[in-house]
């Protein structure tokens, strides 16, 4: 006997709705951006304020697609990177690589 499954409800987006993930995301972005800024300073003799997990996350990253959040944060620090492509490996100096 082949019966169709019955669902009373379906939740499609749990991120921040059912589970609290913003703090985890902010910490992950802090690590990513701070590592990038530190490496950039070593190679380019520049200095940039580090990522603030509260204010910078809310101002530049939260609620945006990843590539837009990266561009937005980097722009706030006066940094431009080429977009690159989704095939870029981690460490490639591009939006997708970051």
Image (spheres, rainbow, N blue to C red):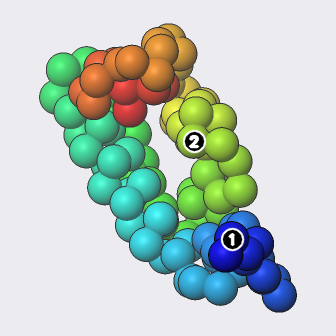
Taking 4 as reference, is 87 left or right? left
Q: Which of the two discs, 1 and 2, sits closer to the camera?
A: 1
| Marks 1 and 2, the one that precedes in the sequence | 1
Task: Identify the disc placed on residue 66.
Answer: 2
Residue at numbered disc 1: 2
Q: CA distance from mark 1 to mark 2?
A: 42 Å
Up-down relation of residue 18 to residue 32 (above or below): below
Kindly give the residue lying farthest to the front in the view shown.
1
Local SS, label 2 = helix
Taking 21 as reference, is 45 left or right? left
In the rendered image, is residue 91 in sight?
Answer: yes
Classify residue 9 by image quadrant. bottom right
In the rendered image, is residue 94 in sight?
Answer: no
Question: Split into 4 quadrants, where in the image is the N terminus?
Answer: bottom right
Q: Nearer the viewer, residue 54 or 13?
A: 13
Taking 12 as reference, is 22 left or right? left
Residue occupying image coordinates x 57% and y 60%: 57
Give x and y (percent) for residue 86: 46, 22
Give x and y (percent) for residue 47: 33, 35
Residue occupying image coordinates x 39% and y 39%: 48
Q: Residues within 10 Å of mark 2 (few under 14, many from 20)?
A: some
Question: Split into 4 quadrants, where in the image is the C terminus?
Answer: top left
Local SS, label 1 = loop
Q: Nearer the viewer, residue 21 or 40?
A: 21
């Amino acid at each position: 006997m082949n019966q169709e499954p019955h669902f009373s409800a379906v939740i499609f987006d749990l991120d921040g709705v059912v589970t609290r993930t913003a703090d985890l995301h902010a910490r992950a972005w802090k690590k990513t951006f701070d590592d990038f800024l530190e490496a950039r300073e070593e190679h380019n003799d520049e200095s940039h304020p580090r990522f603030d997990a509260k204010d910078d996350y809310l101002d530049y990253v939260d609620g945006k697609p990843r590539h837009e959040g990266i561009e937005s944060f980097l722009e706030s620090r006066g940094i431009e990177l080429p977009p690159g492509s989704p095939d870029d490996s981690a460490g490639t100096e591009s939006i997708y690589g970051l």
